[in-house]
Image (cartoon, helix red, strand yellow):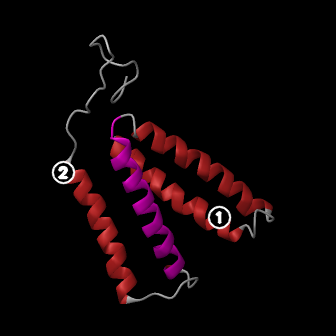
Amino acid sequence: MPWVLLVLSAFLEAVWASALAASDGLSRPLPAALFGVAIVLSMLGLARAARSIPMSTAYAVWTGLGAALTVAWAMAFGEEQASVAKALLIAGIVGSVVGLKLVGHPEPVRPRRADGGESPGAGGSS
């Protein structure tokens, strides 16, 4: 479930990036409102997914997929010129994200306090 949430959050990253571009510097109300809602939901989803997925991996996936989806959207709607090279590079990003999912992650290393106990809030989900 955290991976599904992370992918949905990456999709919302592409939504807010596209809405930001369409808002003309946040001067157009509808795209500006869509930007605001999408960025908040995207960040909340990233934060929630990072409770189970290491932040370094979650952030790499979130930014990578978000960027790939943003470029793909722009190419699909003629806002950016499509090319084979861009398509291959986007495929490389998506392949890297799949690779990060497949290699998984071991249990996080939990920092120790000076007295030998675990630091509060350290590690994965609570």
Crowding around mark 2 (Cα neighbors within 10 Å: few <14, some 14 to 19, many 20+) is few
Residue, disc 1: 19
Identify the disc placed on residue 103: 2
Image point (48%, 43%), residue name: 45
Determine whether, in the image, residue 27 is placed left or right of residue 23. Answer: right
Q: Nearer the observer, disc 1 or disc 2?
A: 2
Q: Is residue 71 above or below residue 6?
A: below
* Magenta run includes residue 4: no
Q: Position of residue 12 (x, y in %)?
A: 53, 55
User: Could you tell me which quadrant the N terminus lies in?
Assistant: top left
Determine whether, in the image, residue 40 is placed left or right of residue 118. Answer: right
> Mark 1 is on which residue type?
Ala
Q: Is residue 4 above or below residue 96?
A: above
Q: Position of residue 82 (x, y in %)?
A: 46, 87
Identify the disc placed on residue 97: none
Q: Is residue 35 above or below residue 3?
A: below
Crowding around mark 1 (Cα neighbors within 10 Å: few <14, some 14 to 19, many 20+) is many
- The kind of secondary structure the magenta stretch mainly shows is helix
Q: What secondary structure is found at the residue carrying circle 2? A: helix
Image point (71%, 63%), residue name: 31
> Mark 2 is on which residue type?
Val
- State the image quarter where residue 33 is shown: bottom right
